[in-house]
Amino acid sequence: MAATGGVRLAIAWFQCQAGASGDMLLGALIDAGAPLEAVRQAVDAVGVEPILITAERTDRHGIAATRARVKTVHSHVHRTWHDVRVLLDRADLPEPVHERAHDVFDRLARAEARAHRCLPEEVHFHEVGALDAIADVVGTCTALHALGIEEAVGSPVALGNGSVRAAHGVLPVPAPAVLELMRMAAAPVYAGPAPYEMCTPTGAALLTSVCRSWGPLPALRITADGTGAGSRRVEEVPNILRVVLGERYAAERERPAGEDVLIETNVDDLDPRLWPAVLSKLLAIGAGDAWLVPILMKKGRPAHTLCVLVPADRVDAALHTVFVETSTIGARIVPVAKRALDREFGTVRVEGLPVRVKTAMFEGRVVNAQPEYEDVAAAAATLGRPVKVVMGAATAAAYAAGLLP
């Protein structure tokens, strides 16, 4: 959609105070306006056993919501990542839906592989490979595509606590795969108020695939909202997941002077092994960038200057992280001007595995492009290849796809 002052970007914010599951995400998006028939057609295109998807009105603690139900025939099939990949590749799905669903199951395979100490190709999905989970993943990816969502932000996610019975036996909550998925995405999490499984592996994989940032509701013009109901009724919290849809302009991402802040502090008494975690937490709370500069302080003491670039509305959160996670007792705060290029993501494949490529645009053309390191490293681990080899292959694939300048 064209608009004065920039291009409108459709953005979604997911509120996960009761966790997340595939059916909750699907129900919220349908409630927000995603066409149920398009979801059904996409799931049918996968070509597995008959699957019926319905959406019914319900409530949780008096809050109106939509519950998505997936009805299937009973199946004992335990599909591997290869089996699911073949199903997705054969399905007649829009390319964005195919790529997103592929990414979700790839994340699940890597998380389950780490949890069970095996290779991703050896993972038998059990619950997440069941028909209802395939429907949840493909259905949610289709709903996102139908709503035109280009960016997504997630709130901190309630994971629950206790234990749950799964195909492998009784598992602690949060499940190992859920913890691994959230770790890989550097997503903010907490236990939440209810002693149950609040976030499922499917829900975690969908959220971490869709959300590129985490935090409170961002500045946007609200266009719609939706509420998805979980299957369980719990007393401690309304078992719902909300999505808020809205628009913001690309030009608004280039903030004028005074809306970004640079926080700096010199630290000479912190164990250097702690710095990577500090930087990750600062990025997770919304910092645009965070880095260290080696310095030499008085009396020849080696030290680091911690630099954090944040939007003005995230200064308090950043300072909280700096003061709690480091040994500093003060920080400098300097308003700065910032000019940022518009960025877009494309996806290439290296031996069948997806690798996102970030491109930077200036005056309507690509001036820089770089494969995402985390995707390259994950593909290298799956393929058993050096990271530098996969990086080169991804760069070549990006060039062939026209993503490079």
Image (spheres, rainbow, N blue to C red):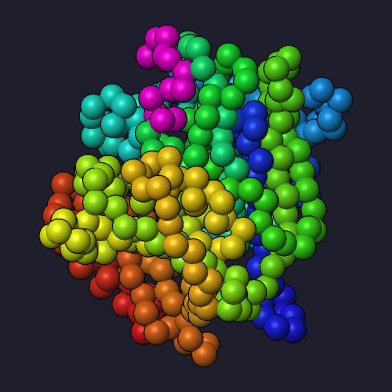
From this viewpoint, which residue is outermost toward the bottom? 363
Question: Which residue sits at x=23%, y=27%?
Answer: 117
Residue 107 point in image, percent of width and height: 39, 42
* Highlighted magenta segment, given as a residue range: 167-179
Residue 316 point in image, percent of width and height: 56, 51
Q: Quadrant of residue 149?
A: bottom right
Decide if residue 191 is on the left or right side of residue 266.
right
Residue 371 point in image, percent of width and height: 33, 65
Q: Quadrant of residue 331?
A: bottom left
Decide if residue 350 is on the left or right side of residue 68.
left
Residue 229 belongs to the span the image colors magenta: no
The C terminus - image quarter: bottom left
Residue 230 point in image, percent of width and height: 68, 26
Question: Which residue sits at x=33%, y=38%?
Answer: 110
The N terminus - image quarter: bottom right
Nearer the observer, 216 or 75: 216
Residue 89 visible from this viewpoint: no
35 relative to 393, above or below: above
Nearer the observer, 255 or 372: 255
Residue 332 visible from this viewpoint: yes
